[in-house]
Amino acid sequence: WWRDTEGFDFENSALEQHLKDGLKLKGDPEGWIGKVVKRRFDDGRVYFGKIVGWFDDTEDDEPLWLCLYPDGDSEDLERRDARRAVRWAEQSELDERVRAARKVDIYALTERQRGELDEAESKRKAGLEKLLARSSTYSRAASDPTETAVRGIQFMFEIGRREKNLQGFGADLIQTLFDVGAVAPDPVRR
């Protein structure tokens, strides 16, 4: 999908599901709700987040702490991992990433994300409209599904000839070609 939107929870559905699953927003046994955490992930990069709630009724009877990150991603931490992450963050110097993690708000997070999404979508639509204005048009409607699919594929290749278009819409082009290939009539799929 769109670049920079991975992990965003646009409808706040994750929070609703977490609450249904028993997420508690206060009263955790360690007092970690609201604490900033520092974690290193598989990509080798260090991220700061904030513990926003906890689950006391889990399968293995050990509590889990829900950690949110400024980019909208989240994870459940076991006691040992949460303790390490809180201690590591407390030892960190106060920098922009720590400040961003402290500002994480479980309720306001999606409003910021929606604003960022709206801005990215507006730019994307404006680019597509500009692109479509320069594209060739047909004097008659397609006569059958095969011709419709062929026209769509030709359009994708026409767009893909320009490097700038590939940079801005490459993922959309690939996804569209995949979608066309999945539903196109047999002569086109082959």
Image (tube, rainbow, N blue to C red):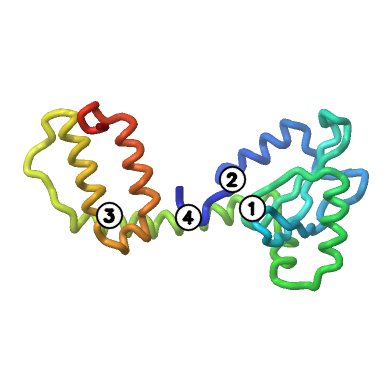
The answer to whether 12 appears left or right of 86 in the picture is left
Are discs 2 and 1 less than 8 Å apart at CB? yes
Q: How far separated are the C-alphas under marks 4 and 2? A: 15 Å
Q: Which mark is residue 109?
A: 1
Vertical position of residue 123 compared to residue 23: above or below: below
10 Å neighbourhood of mark 3: few (<14), some, or many (≥20)? Answer: some
The answer to whether 184 appears left or right of 115 in the picture is left
Q: Which mark is residue 3?
A: 4
Of marks 1 and 3, the one in the foreground = 3
Q: Residue at x 74, y 66 (%)?
A: 98
Vertical position of residue 167 compared to residue 185: above or below: below
Q: Residue at x 27, y 54 (%)?
A: 160
Of marks 4 and 3, the one in the foreground = 3
10 Å neighbourhood of mark 2: few (<14), some, or many (≥20)? Answer: some
Q: Quadrant of the C terminus?
A: top left
Q: Earlier in the sequence, mark 3 or mark 2?
A: 2
The answer to whether 161 appears left or right of 23 in the picture is left
Q: Earlier in the sequence, mark 2 or mark 1?
A: 2
Q: Earlier in the sequence, mark 4 or mark 2?
A: 4
Vertical position of residue 61 compared to residue 80: above or below: above
**Image quadrant where residue 169 sits:** bottom left
Identified by mark 3, the residue type is Gly
Kindly identify which residue carries mark 3.
Answer: 160
